[in-house]
Amino acid sequence: MPKNIKPIYLDHSATTPLDKEVLKAMLPYFSQKFGNPSSLYSYGQQAAAAVDRARQQAAEFLNCQPDEIIFTSGATEADNLAIFGVASALKKTSGGKFHLITSAIEHPAVLEPFNQLEEQGAEVSYLPVKKNGVVDLEVFRKSIKDNTVFVSIMYVNNEVGSIQPIREMGKIIEKINRERARRGSRRKIYFHTDAVQALNFLNCDVKYLHVDLLSLSGHKIYGPKGVGALFVKSGTPLAGVQLGGHQEKNLRSGTLNVPGIVGLAEAIKITAKHREKNNKKIAELRNEFVSSLRRRLPGIIVNTDFKNATPAHANISFVGAEGEAILIALDLAGVAVSTGSACASASLKASSVLLAMGIKEEVAHSTIRFTFGKNNSRVERRRVLKLLPPLVRRLKRMAPEL
Amino acid sequence: MQYSKKVIEHFRNPHNQGRIKNADAVGQVGNLACGDVMKIYLKISENKKGESIIKDIKFETLGCAAAIAVSSALTDRVKGMTLARALTIEKDDIVKDLGGLPPIKVHCSRLGVEALHQAINQYFKK
């Protein structure tokens, strides 16, 4: 990062800066009101009251009951708890081979637990996506079998920003559950969504979405890292994965992260309050960025389907230049972005999300993800538009003719 | 993952970048699907002892910052060298020249050395 230049952050899908108001709300809970909410004396009860308030706020946002919320260390833990927790509870009550459904473009926090359940004998369908990164509803409907018991589909994909038809899927599942009940079957399908990337932009009312479980995270919504939550509709079978302290109705043991939980609730409150205004601002920034960039670099490929994505995402391929090189060159100029290139991943494989969308490997390697946030400005956009095209052209010139 | 200062210097201002018209030998490795392609151009002449030397070398690379830095450092190292000596260059030499590479990027240095060796072998076959 260069000195003397204010850096520009365009990777809000990775994490977001903590909102000052959120920090203010959290501060008293570090060293003044530091009690353990499980303690019975006043220190503890003060902390417990703050957690209760936070739970109430989160419940209002999701339109659920406060006791349907389990605080976790983040969305990865929430996803793991949802998937392993339901699978393990169902295993105890019903026999036979389970069929589970997820999509090919899920976050590893969902995919890897499914991989593990598959190794343990469950049958898993990994649904493909259309070219725009969205699961086809008909494909989804057809994938449901008589022994399907659990579905997990993300609300918004982190790499391209595509929005999945969660509400429609939820309704399909409810209809099948009603039919099963009519036939006298006690086997239900439980529906989980990882809503981490959706919270800032979309309706997360769990009744509107018709979901049984929903994961969320603090640090993607200008809240703190290390805290998240899982909504679990009452009556959903769930077994705790982390055992020991009996917190959160014994479904998530571990001393509650009080400042984190307070911060999460404050971040939820702020994002909900300013959602429309921020969505509009961010969409304007992103749309103008992409159309200006198209004029300056005619060969770019825009992988985000703006008609079906968050206003923040612009996933773009700069064919002929390599993504990691663009990322590093941008970083040297003070701009933070991410890439779908293999050269930037620990696995040395191109982004599986882009490949699942039918994007060729050579194109995937040249991909940069820009994700705008509420604090970005037009001045920043102008600066990036000025420095990005020459930087891409320079890298292209260095490449051999192929 | 963090790049050394040397890597960043080479990436910012690569040495010997470009192509040689009427090159005496060309080597190219990698492919688009894996993301890195390196092409090395050589101009060969003889020194006073009558040995073949690399008179000029240029590279063209499509790849990550490490791949570009490797190409640049490699050309620096072998320019003026006899072909026999250049063939003894190993990837670790380049990694050392760059002040180290993140472990996951070490394969980029192998790619550079392979492109050079391919060019030299092509010259010998002529």
Image (cartoon, coloured by chain):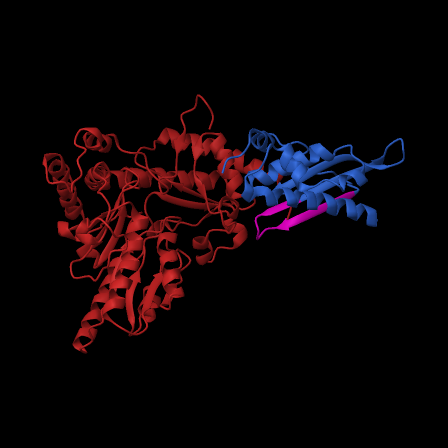
Q: Does the segment drawn in magenta span residue B36?
A: yes
Q: What percent of the width, then of the height, locates residue B116?
A: 72, 43
SS assignment for the magenta stretch, majority: strand
| Quadrant of residue A233 within the rendered picture | bottom left
Residue at 32% x, 51% y is A156
Can residue A77 be seen in the rendering of this structure?
yes
Q: Is residue A219 magenta?
A: no
How many numbered marks are there? 0
Q: Which sits in the foreground, A342 or A159?
A: A342
Residue A377 lies, in percent from the top left, at 34, 31
Range of residues picked out in magenta? B25-38
Extreme residue in the top direction: A4
Q: Nearer the viewer, residue A94 or A114?
A: A94
Q: Is residue A262 above or below residue A119?
A: above
Question: In the picture provided, is B15 more to the left or to the right than A279?
Answer: right
Return the x and y of residue A288 as percentages of the image width and height: 38, 39
Q: Is residue A104 left or right of residue A155?
A: right
**Left or right of B45 in this view: A197:** left
Q: Colour of chain A?
A: red
Indicate whether B66 appears above or below A155.
Answer: above
Residue B63 seen in this snapshot: no
Q: Residue at x 52, y 53 (%)?
A: A361
- Name the residue at the right extreme: B49
- Residue A28 falls in which quadrant of the image? top left
Chain ID for blue: B
The quadrant holding residue A136 is bottom left
| Residue A375 coordinates in the image, percent (x, y) | 31, 33
